[in-house]
Amino acid sequence: MAHASKSSVSQHHHPRSSTTAGYANNGQVAIDVAVSQYKQARASQGSNFVNSGQAILEETNKSAYSGFAVTPYTPRRQIDQCEQALHNTNRSQYRIEDDHEERWYVTKSPHLRECFTEFLGTFVMICFGMGVNNQVVLSEEGNGTWLSINMAWGIAVLMGVYCSEGVSGAHMNCAVSFAHAVYGRLPWWKFPGYCVAQTLGAFLGACTIYLLDYQKLMKADPNKETTQANFATYPNPDISNVTAFYSEALATSMLLLCIYAITDQRNRSPGTVGTPFAFCLMIMALGMSFGMNT
């Protein structure tokens, strides 16, 4: 009777114990059902379902990038069972991958992949950045203001990081690549390729926006005397070249300082999810703080 009474008291004081166990059992059942559905789909299709950018859902827990050449920035994290079940329930992200499917172009060179992604990330960043510059200036602030320029540039960097961070580290700036090479984060032999890719991506992005706004540019500045500042950095007429150089040097120093502080794992790092957003806020702050002189 004493044992029965003690058990009754325990159940009376802990009514959630059975509920918690029920939640756990329900979660395990959901995982088992999802895995079972995935295996049945594989058996019926005779091919592997592949998540379009996150993970190859195999029992062997291979990396999402196992079919490509490895780079220093290739994610090493494996997908656990809970995450597999989550991915298995989202059928809209799957495609059927045939063993005999011919891919349009896949390079086996890790460095070439890094250069391609630096090109893409820089291109995306410049398209958004130059786009907002021209929109605000050519509309005479009718379709934007100084604030929208800085906010759009921050978002431009955010989108560029998302396009290239997983493969090349998303430098998108020769100064960043140079600093990484100096501090041993980037081999020196990779530095020229990064710079060439970033430069080509920037010029192609600028050309894309130039073609987009060509008619407006010709109407606003037929002699091409004032709108060059939409595409490049020029000193303010009220300051000297020395002040302009100091302004750019200070802004670049702050850029690199913040990048190293944000990505330092021994510091209060925002993590892999928060880092791109921290870069976005940093670019906004730099534009709002140091953008007046140049």
Image (tube, rainbow, N blue to C red):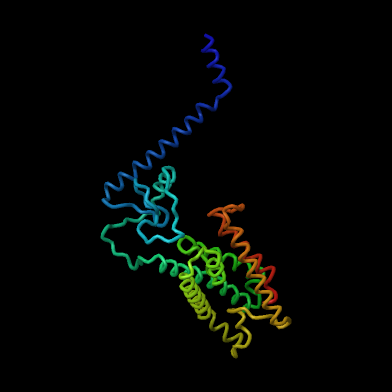
Q: Is residue 161 above or below residue 142?
A: above
Residue 229 appears at what percent x and percent y? 62, 80
Q: Is residue 224 left or right of residue 44?
A: right
Residue 241 appears at what percent x and percent y? 69, 82
Q: Nearer the viewer, residue 200 or 49?
A: 200
Q: Quadrant of the C terminus?
A: bottom right
Q: Say if residue 163 shows up in the picture.
A: no
Q: Nearer the viewer, residue 161 or 10?
A: 161
Marker count (numbered): 0
Q: Residue at x 68, y 71 (%)?
A: 290
Residue 216 appears at what percent x and percent y? 57, 82
Residue reaching furthest to the bottom: 223
Q: Nearer the viewer, residue 131 or 265?
A: 265
Q: Residue at x 40, y 60 (%)?
A: 70
Q: Nearer the viewer, residue 161 or 177?
A: 177
Q: Is residue 263 above or below residue 8?
A: below
| Quarter location, residue 244 | bottom right
Q: Is residue 236 left or right of residue 175?
A: right
Residue reaching furthest to the top: 1
Q: Say if residue 211 shows up in the picture.
A: yes
Q: Residue at x 50, y 76 (%)?
A: 199
Residue 200 appears at what percent x and percent y? 48, 76
Q: Is residue 237 above or below residue 169?
A: below
